[in-house]
Image (cartoon, rainbow, N blue to C red):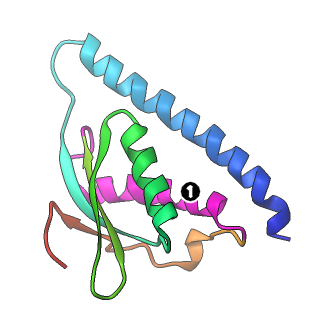
């Protein structure tokens, strides 16, 4: 049954991502066009649920393509956990950076995995570390 929903999940990811691009582009444009600066930059190290290099690559690319965010790097620790380092122009709090990154991850994994991905079945609390802190 999940295989039958694979194409619609990909289409939903594309529609959702276009919305993210529009929303973040508007935030950056508004910040550039108005006096003052709304930016509160932050960096977080975020543990992902990605199992393959393709999943990490897709997540990193989509974060980087989104205006105001940038993937600084990735890392696989000794336990096999995959981490990404994310810079955000508008989420100064590492928890907020992680929350946005995990939301994107959840949409990507739901589309990429034929069996789907349900983030409600995974504990996504305490998934970040400030800056480049070691695990």
Horizontal relation, residue 5 to residue 110: left or right: right
Vertical placement of 62 versus 3: above or below? above
Q: Which residues are magenta?
A: 89-114
Q: In the visual, does 15 lie left or right of 101?
A: right
Image quadrant holding the C terminus, namely bottom left
Among the 4 quarters of the image, the one containing residue 18: top right
Residue 60 placement, left or right of 76: right
| Up-down relation of residue 120 to residue 65 (above or below) | below
Taking the magenta stretch, the answer to whether it contains residue 97 is yes
Give x and y (percent) for residue 22.
50, 27
What x and y, as percent, mark residue 15?
65, 38
Q: Residue at x 46, y 78 (%)?
A: 123
Q: Residue at x 33, y 59 (%)?
A: 98
Farthest residue, direction bottom: 79
Q: For mark 1, give the secondary structure.
A: helix
> Could you tell me which quadrant the N terminus lies in?
bottom right
Q: Residue at x 76, y 59 (%)?
A: 6
Residue placed most toward the observer, 77 or 28: 77
Q: Which residue is mark 1?
A: 108
Instruction: Residue at the far front: name it.
Output: 53
Is residue 37 shown in magenta? no
What's the residue at 18%, 39% (across, down)? 40
Q: Quadrant of residue 57?
A: bottom left
Image quadrant where residue 112 sits: bottom right
Residue 8, above or below 115: above
Magenta stretch, main secondary structure class: helix
């Amino acid at each position: 049954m999940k295989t039958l929903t694979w194409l619609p999940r990909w289409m939903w990811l594309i529609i959702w991502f276009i919305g993210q691009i529009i929303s973040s582009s508007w935030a950056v444009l508004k910040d550039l066009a108005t006096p003052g600066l709304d930016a509160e930059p932050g960096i977080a190290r975020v543990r992902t649920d990605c199992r393959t290099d393709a999943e990490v690559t897709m997540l990193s690319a989509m974060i980087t393509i989104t205006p105001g965010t940038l993937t600084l790097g990735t890392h696989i620790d000794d336990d096999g956990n995959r981490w990404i380092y994310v810079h955000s122009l508008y989420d100064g709090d590492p928890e907020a950076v992680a929350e946005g990154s995990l939301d994107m991850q959840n949409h990507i994994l739901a589309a990429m995995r034929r069996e789907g991905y349900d983030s409600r079945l995974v504990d996504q609390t305490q998934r970040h570390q400030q800056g480049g802190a070691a695990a």
